[in-house]
Amino acid sequence: MPGIHEGSGLCEGRDEGRGGLESLGTYEASVYSQCGEDGVLQRIFEVIGAHNRRFVEFGAWDGQHLSNTANLRLQHGWTGLLMEGSDRADGVLVQQEFVNAENVNRLFAKYAVPPVFDLLSIDIDGNDYWVWKAIEDYTPRVVVMEYNIFFGLHHACTIRYDADHVWDETLYHGASLLALRNLGREKGYSLVHTDSWAPNAFFVLESALPAGYEEPPIEHVTPWNAFDEMPPVEGREWVRL
């Protein structure tokens, strides 16, 4: 399966505003990812450069299907840590680990994740906010993670933390985009993009951004802004942040 290369048509009509990180939607293209993440990530690293071409991804399924890191690993020589809590993990390419806020830093140490690495991909359909918040002493330069699109942009909410949470395929999952944007700011990141057709948000470490970059307003970043009320959760509750 081919990778994404400059000259493939992906980069046509690029807008060099914000140091080349504006209009990232025009770079959306998939090799292994779900909805264009491969192209967006390649463009981001074209602009900010790569530090060590290392990544961490969880939940990573089998390390290829709908993966945000497979294109970088298989086509561009990147290496890193893949973790998955289910039996999709083979224990060789993908480590079978159930990641939560209590163990995420221990797992990074167990698998010798470097203190600074290029890409963190989080997709656990639940405690995503709490796990990112818990990461200490490790600095990914780019973070991509799913958000819950069923919130209005004025809601900063997430699920209540439960270390054993597994998504039950209801609306009770993850965190709102505003909650993640605010957490990103606390950790020193700017929200630069969300997918056009999937609920993935992309954050770049402020110190890695091009000089003069200004984070766009949240309503300019996402196409998902159709909801005024918080999603119904049948007796459970959202944590307002």
Image: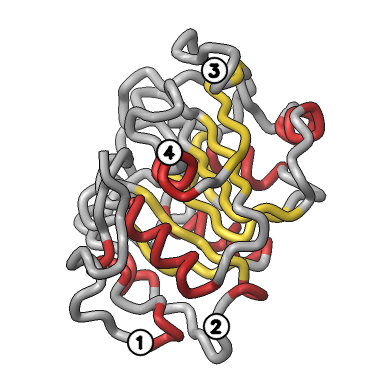
Instruction: State which mark lies toward you, 4 or 2.
Output: 4
Position of 205 relative to 183 (above/below): below
Q: Earlier in the sequence, mark 2 or mark 1?
A: 1
Q: Quadrant of the N terminus?
A: top left
Q: Earlier in the sequence, mark 4 or mark 3?
A: 4
Separation of residues labelled 2 and 3 (CA atoms): 36 Å
Where disc 1 sits, the SS reads loop
Instruction: State which mark lies toward you, 4 or 3.
Output: 4
Separation of residues labelled 2 and 1 (CA atoms): 11 Å
The picture quadrant where one finds residue 88 is top left
Instruction: State which mark lies toward you, 1 or 4.
Output: 4
Q: Is residue 130 visible?
A: no
Q: Position of residue 222 (x, y in %)?
A: 30, 63
Q: Earlier in the sequence, mark 4 or mark 2?
A: 4
The kind of residue on which mark 2 rests is Pro
Instruction: State which mark lies toward you, 3 or 1.
Output: 1
Where disc 3 sits, the SS reads loop
The kind of residue on which mark 4 rests is Ala
Position of 218 relative to 82 (above/below): below
The kind of residue on which mark 1 rests is Glu
Q: Earlier in the sequence, mark 1 or mark 4?
A: 1
Classed neighbour count for the residue bearing mark 3: other residues with Cα under 10 Å, few (<14), some (14–19), many (≥20): some
* Disc assigned to residue 85: 3
Q: Position of residue 69 (x, y in %)?
A: 46, 42
Separation of residues labelled 3 and 1 (CA atoms): 40 Å
The residue singled out by tag 4 in the image is: 70
Where disc 4 sits, the SS reads helix
* Disc assigned to residue 210: 2
* Disc assigned to residue 180: none
* Disc assigned to residue 16: 1
Q: Earlier in the sequence, mark 3 or mark 1?
A: 1
Q: Residue at x 51, y 54 (%)?
A: 180
